[in-house]
Amino acid sequence: MSTLTTSQPNNRAQKLALVVGYLALAGGVLFAYGKPATGYEIDIYGSTPIGFWLGVAIALLVAVFVTLYAPEGYVSLAGLSLGGGGIVAIAGLPLLRSYFYYGSGDGLTHLGWTRDLLDGSLSAFGLFYPGVHTSSLFIRGVANTTVPRSLLLIVLAYVVAYLVFIPLCVRSMTSHRGAMLLSGLAGLLVLPINHMGVNYMTPHPISDSILITPIIVYLLINYLTSPTDVFESRLPVSAVSAAFAVALGGLVLFHSQQAANLIILFITLSGVQLLYRSIRPDSAIASHRTMYGPTVFLIGSFMLWSIGRGRYESSVNAVLRELLSFLTGGAELGASTASQASSLTAIGGSIVELFLKLFGVSLVVAALAGLLMVTSLFGRLRDAPDTTALIKYFTIGLVVLIPYSLLFYIGTVSELFFRNAGLIMLFATILGSIALYRYVSGLSEIAPIGSVRAVLSVIIVAMLALSVVVVFPSPYIFQPNDQVSETQMSGYGFAFEHSTEETPIYGLRSGPWRYKHGALGVEGTPVSQHGRGIPGENLSALAGRTSNDRYVAVTEAAREREVEVYRSLRYSRENVSALDHQSGVSLVQTNGEFDLYHVAGSSPADGASATVANESRTAGANGTTPRAPPTNRSVFGNASTPSRTPTATATATPTTTATATATATATPTATPTTTDSESIFGIIDGSSNGTPTPTSGPTVGG
């Protein structure tokens, strides 16, 4: 008898526990909502009030207890729902704590594209993966909210879809209720998120497409196994076939790589069906609906949308180039991972430590799935014919998909492997849950049921704890919080709107081009993806390094990131602080979280402009303007997000002793995207996380 389906005569304790759990969850949410973020937070976990974590911890503990101990019926489902609510509350922390936006890398470019779609400067057909952006605009219209907040809401909705459809997939595969309950608990681990190629909360099309893939898997299972639809006699296709087609077409619009992964899977399933129809015509697989139609439809949709697009062709060329280089002895396996390993060692970490933090729980679930796969391939599953057939489908599919994914673990494109690893962990969650149910059921026959339940509860709680701490990037995994504060964004926006191409803005690491996308949009906004980052060793003597004047933007987030997370690997506190004490370097804009410095060139032209507000400010004795005290409002006035279209700029000639007088100048017209491959300030790689960025166009990892 299964441990998870043994009824108990009295479930009053479980119901009381549920009341406590839901009240604790509600209280925790109110704690978080009542303490909104007042500025940038380097660690979302440490900055969230302890009352929230206490409430969520109680809710998750109750959820595991009730799900595993409650009798059959709505009580166990209520426990599972409580656990889902706890994970959704954690995933929604940026919303609960009133973050302006989340995602300082690719997320800012996606924010810019969404703004472009809203104001009509970009068509949905002009985006390679418009699914996330158009969905967020729908949410914006329904909820009457801002574009940044609508993006965070739609990403949270994808997490909800993942949590709901993982147990639905297992319920469609097997008649065992216990397997469904365990899959619901396994879904709470959100194992596809690995922060190497699949991120969370920041709008990231490949990550979001993986989170909604359980919907497609659910439709796939029902397409294969469902009897003839009652509408099939009236319509050319069945209802499930129509829904399946719509979902597949939608996935292509979310991300082409995920669509390509499913093409590989569907071709494999079609081959399995063809083989079984030839050698075992009486098997369950032979009786299932064929995958030929959906496979052709997905391939056709993929080709129709992708062929001829520059982004698709450049991505394919990059993979082929790295593969050819690897075969000829040029590229190495996991080159980007090796680069990160050396950086981790330099700041006191190790790749083994990071791997265990990110993939330790995944390894356990993958091992369970692997045991079930081995049994499916070489043994015999004593289960219903459809269940056995579906397990075999996914087993053979993974046998093909895993080696296919390993092809991407080469050279500079090795991040693509970790994207596919997210999809693999989705299927591992489904198969691992079924395997766990089989083994728990077997143990319950030879060991006391209470002991089995207790051990299982402890294991699941431990796995939940280890998974929750890696939902968001944090110093725990050597990454800074990806928060973008409103004060920080308004500072960048003001600087961009009141600067000229003749006096470019530089920054730390990859420079400020992502923020330019987020503030002004992508279309028609000239950016320089390379050469706008200043090496740390140059910060102490900037003036005169270039013939023309420059600006340097430094945020409080960057200061905390470099010192507290990256432990002064590239920039020390002394390097950054040197900007306040240099001759020829003037602080011309500040709002407490964003500082803009004017750097004099070696031969500045007469009237070289320095962007300042329409006010007089006296430079310090050493040629710099003293730092303003931290505040959530810009010293120039309202700290709200700037308008999309600049109208005029306020400029002044900076001096080291005189006041700055503002004058109006016309706004420069937009020019095509430019790329400075080299900078007189030094050559800096082109991404916020240290990963080199391609030079063509506004590159986004997707």
Image: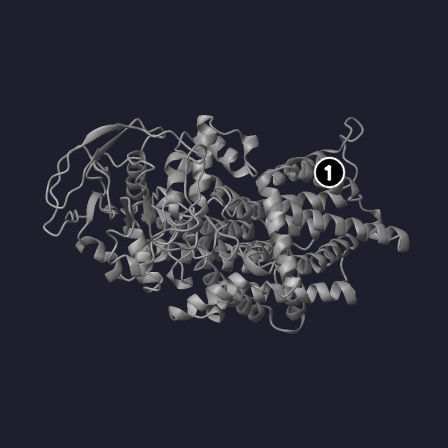
Q: Residues within 10 Å of mark 1 (few under 14, many from 20)?
A: some
Left or right: residue 460 versus residue 284 is: left
Estimate the x, y position of residue 331 in percent, counting from the top left: 59, 62
Q: Is residue 462 visible?
A: no
Q: Residue at x 45, y 28 (%)?
A: 118
Look at the picture and state if 514 lies above or below 427: above
The location of residue 107, given as percent across then percent down, is 44, 44
Q: Is residue 444 left or right of residue 22?
A: right
Q: Position of residue 672 (x, y in %)?
A: 45, 35
**Which residue sits at x=62%, y=54%?**
321
Residue 505 is situated, as x and y percent measured from the top left of the image, at: 32, 44
Element assignment for label 1: helix
Coloring scheme of the render?
Answer: one colour
Please name whichever residue, 125 or 97, is drawn nearer the observer in this view of the structure. 125
Q: Is residue 464 visible?
A: yes
* Tag 1: amino acid: Phe
Residue behind mark 1: 297
Figure quadrant of residue 238: top right
Q: Nearer the viewer, residue 197 or 158?
A: 197
